[in-house]
Image (cartoon, helix red, strand yellow):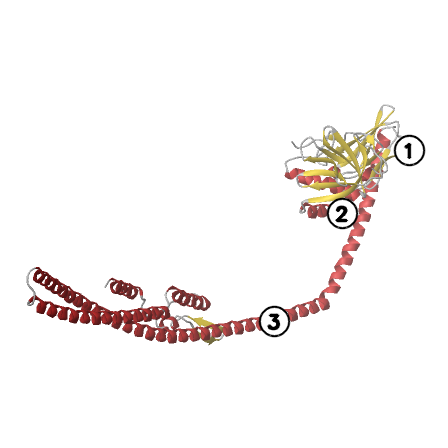
Amino acid sequence: MTKAATLYGAKTQTETLRPGPLRPANIIRNKFPTYKNGSNGIVIKLADGPEMPPLKEIVAKETADLLDRRQRLSVRELAMKFEKGLNTATLLSNEVKWRQVALLERDILLKNLKSVLESLRGRVTGKTKDEIEESISMVEILAVQLSKREAELLQQKEEVTKLAKSLKQASEDAKRIVEEERANAHTEIESAKNAVQRVQQAVQEHEKMSQSTGKQDMEELRKEVREARRIKMLHQPSKAMDLENEIRILRKTFAEKSTDCVNLLKELELHKRLKESDTPSFDLEGLQCLGSVLRIVALSGTHMDLSNISIQWFRIHPKESNKEIISGATRPVYALEPHDVGRYLQAEIDVGGEIAVAKTAGPVDPDAGLVEYVETLVRKPETEFNVVVLQLNGIEQPKESVHVLNVGRLRMRLTKGKSVVAKEFYSSSMQLCGVRGGGEAASQAMFWQPSNDLSLVLAFETARERNTAIMLARRFAIDCNIILAGPGDKTPW
C-alpha cells in the first residue's frame, strides 16, 4: 500500500510538471518578414509592428528557445517515465493478484481447520475441550483479520488498476505529443532554414548591387577627373606660364630697384656726413637680411685697423628713436640673428674721441621662406639639429665631436650619443641668441645658457639651421610664457 501510494504521488507531481504543447508553428512563422522588390533594391517589410529585430536574431532566438526547452524537459523522456510507471503498476497488479490467491488459500485452510476443531470439540471433554474452544475463537479472529486484509487488497487493486490506466493514458498522450511536437519542430526548422536562405540571398544580391553601383560611380568619377585634367591642360598651362614669367620679371626688377635705392641712400648719407664733420666715414658692408654678416668698412679710401678701436652695435626700432644696445657686440663684424629682423642696425665707432656712425639703409629683411619652415616644425613635438660644441663655460672645446641639439615643446636637450650634456626646461634664467663676438663662423654659431652655471657656444651646419633653431626655441618658449633673449636684451616682461 505504501509503495503504490508513493508511485501515485510521483505520478501526480509528474503530471503537474508536464508542460503544455509547444507554440504552434504559425506564431513563429508570422514573425518572419516578407521581402518585396522595389525600385531602389530589396525592401524588408515587417508583418507586425514598425520596429522588429533582424531576422537572423529572431531565428537564433527561437532555435535557442527550442533547444532550451528540449534540454529542460523532453517529452520523450516524459513518455519513457510514463512507460516505466506503467511497468511498475503492472508488477504491482500482479503482486496484488498473488496476494489475493494466497488469502483465498488461507481462508480455505482456516475453514477446514475450524470444521476439524468443531468435530473434535464434541468428542473431548475437560481441559482439552477448553483448549479446542480457545483455538476455535482464535481461528475466528484470524478469519476476521484475513477478511479485512482481503478488503484492503481489493482497494489496493482498484487503486493500482486506476494508476495503471492513467499511466497508460499518459504514455499514449506523451507519445502523441512527441509525434506532434516533432512534426511541428521539423516544420519550424524548415521554415527557419528557408527564411535564412531568403535573407542570405537578399543580402548577397544587395552586396552585389552596391558593389556594381560603387564601381560604376568610381568609373564615372575617374572619367570626370580625366576630362577635367584634359581641359585644364588645354587651356590653363599657357596662362600659368605667362603669370610665372611676369612674376619672375617683377621680382628681378624689384630687387634691382631696391639695390639702387639702397646705394642712393648710402651715397646721400655719406654726403651728409662729409658736410657735417671731418671725422672718418664708415659704412656697413653685407646683405641686410637674416643669415648674412655685416662688416664695418672705412669710406676714406685708406685701410684702417679696427681691432683696437672701440665699437658698439645697436638696434633701432623703425617707429622709435631709442637705441637698444646689443650686449657683447663690440667687433667690426656682426652676424644678424632673428631678433634683428624688422629693425635698423647701427654701429658706433670711437675714433680719437669722436664717434662715427655706420647704419643700415633700412630694416633687416627676413630670410625667404624661413618663417613658413618654422611653422611646419612647430607642429612636431621636437626637432633635432647636428651641432659642434665650440665653447663650454668660455673654454674652447675640440671641434671633432658632433652633438645633437633637441628643441622640444617644453625643454631643450644636448646629447652626445647616449650621454646627456645639458637638459633644461624653458625658464626665465635661460638665455639664447646668436654669437656676438664675430669670427668667420659667427653666422652659424649660437650662444645658449641653460642655467646660471652653464653656458655653451654651438656651431650649426648652416646659418639657416642656426636661425631655425633660435626661432623654434623662442616660439616654444612663448607658448610656456617665457621670452628667450640674449644677455642684456630687453623683454616685454
The residue indicated by pointer 3 is 215
Q: Earlier in the sequence, mark 2 or mark 3?
A: 3
The residue indicated by pointer 1 is 300
The percent position of residue 18, horizontal first and vertical second, equals 31, 66
User: Residue 48 versus residue 126: which sits nearer the camera?
Assistant: 126
Vertical relation: 353 (above or below) 387: above
Q: CA distance from mark 3 to mark 1?
A: 81 Å
Residue 112: name its quadrant.
bottom left
Q: Which mark is residue 368?
A: 2
Q: Report whether 54 appears left or right of 244.
A: left
Q: Earlier in the sequence, mark 1 or mark 2?
A: 1
Q: Which mark is residue 45?
A: none
Q: Report whether 69 appears left or right of 468.
A: left
The percent position of residue 66, horizontal first and vertical second, equals 40, 68
* Badge 3 density bin: few <14, some 14–19, many ≥20, Cα 10 Å: few
Residue 466: name its quadrant.
top right
Q: Earlier in the sequence, mark 3 or mark 1?
A: 3
Callout 2: SS: loop
Quarter containing the C terminus: top right
